[in-house]
Amino acid sequence: MKLLSIAIPSYNSQEYMSHAIESLLPGGDEVEILVVNDGSKDRTAEIADEYEKKYPGIVRAIHKENGGHGDAVMMGLANATGRYFKVVDSDDWVDEESYPKVLAALRERTTAETEIDLLICDYVYDKVGKTRKHVVRYGNALPEGKEFDWEHMKDLKVGQYILMHSAIYRTQMLRECGLTLPKHTFYVDNLYIYTPLPYVQKMLYLDLPFYHYFIGRDDQSVHEEVMIRRIDQQLKVNRMMVDATDVMSVTPVHRREYMFKYLEVITCISSVMCIISGTEENLKKKEELWNYIREKNLPLYERLRRRPFGIAAHLKGKAGRVIVKAAYKLTTKVFGAN
């Protein structure tokens, strides 16, 4: 069994995928790099095959019909042989100094008695044009370098939530938690992180800037204009998160509070994108989302509705939209989200 399986979902990634793969090769034989070619129309498939031929037993090229990012992640998970599993997007990379320390920590946890469900590391917003990179760290909320459970986790700030960039999950737990990522849908990384949380018991945090999240291309899914164009996919993921678990019944309370606040952030993003788009159609979609939450989980709806963002999301008229948009702009400026 490999120590770590790393899936690289790749679609038309010929211009940058080599950087991602090269950053992972120093893991050696303990790591398998699963390059999942998601029906690309450029040289992605050829590049993946070249790496597999050059690094047999380490790099595996997996070719499939186009199904989107989530479908490629699921294909990587289905083919993984490692005890732990991570996703690295084809335009991102890992830090060369942090990488061996992450592997060493995983290596110490390779038996049923020592294994963890989730390893969390810091990540870097590697934004185009920014010389000073924003690093998301968790040291204020998570005990560093030792195993912990939900009771030992302090509150995370807005912009500090655990994302796909910062997470390495235990492979078998991912397979057993009922994770399903829909095809041809963006923003499924939120489902990927959220769905397994009720199954996570033992965690480990390393204060290392392990993952470099490249951000700045105009066609990236987190770009504001792109998010508005794809609002239906954001709303779909939001609904699937509501359906994934009855978050108001989750135990212990620390886990429930974390999951609630995570879902709150996603619902806020969905609502804000609908509002700042300025169209009556999208405003109607916002109302439909809130009605969906109310019908599916009334206690969740009532709590969300009483929160500051829930109140703001329902402000009427032009003044309400101005307030919401200004708050959104301030948040993205502070946290460098897009």
Image (cartoon, rainbow, N blue to C red):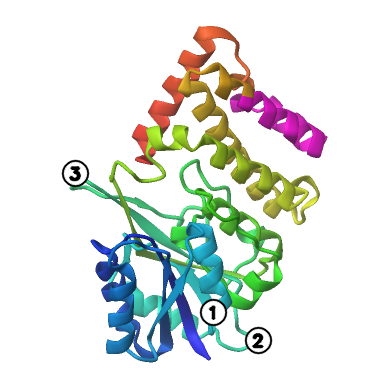
Q: Nearer the viewer, residue 267 or 292?
A: 292
Magenta stretch: give its range: 285-310
Cα separation, mark 2 vs mark 3, equals: 45 Å
Which of the 4 image quarters holds residue 298? top right
Say if residue 146 shows up in the picture. Answer: no
Quadrant position of residue 197: bottom right
Q: Is residue 117 left or right of residue 29?
A: right
Q: Amino acid at mark 3?
A: Gly
Dot 3 crowding, Cα within 10 Å, few <14, some 14–19, many 20+ = few
Identify the main secondary structure in magenta: helix
Which residue carries the number 3 mark? 129
Q: Residue at x 31, y 65 (%)?
A: 93
How far from the left and from the top, in percent, is residue 35? 40, 73
Front: mark 1 or 2: 1
Q: Quadrant of the C terminus?
A: top left
Disc 1 from disc 2: Cα separation: 21 Å
| Residue that badge 2 annotates | 112
Q: Position of residue 94 (x, y in %)?
A: 32, 68
Between 264 and 16, the one nearer to me in the picture: 16
Nearer the observer: mark 2 or 3; the answer is: 3
With 95 as the anchor, is 228 left or right in this view?
A: right
Q: Amino acid at mark 1?
A: Asn
Q: Residue 56 in the image: x percent, y percent?
A: 35, 91
Residue drawn 70% across the image and 65% down it: 178
Question: Where 281 sits versus 202, above or below?
Answer: above
Q: Can the viewer see residue 272 in this picture?
A: yes
Image-based side of 317 in relation to 178, left or right: left
**Residue holding disc 1:** 79
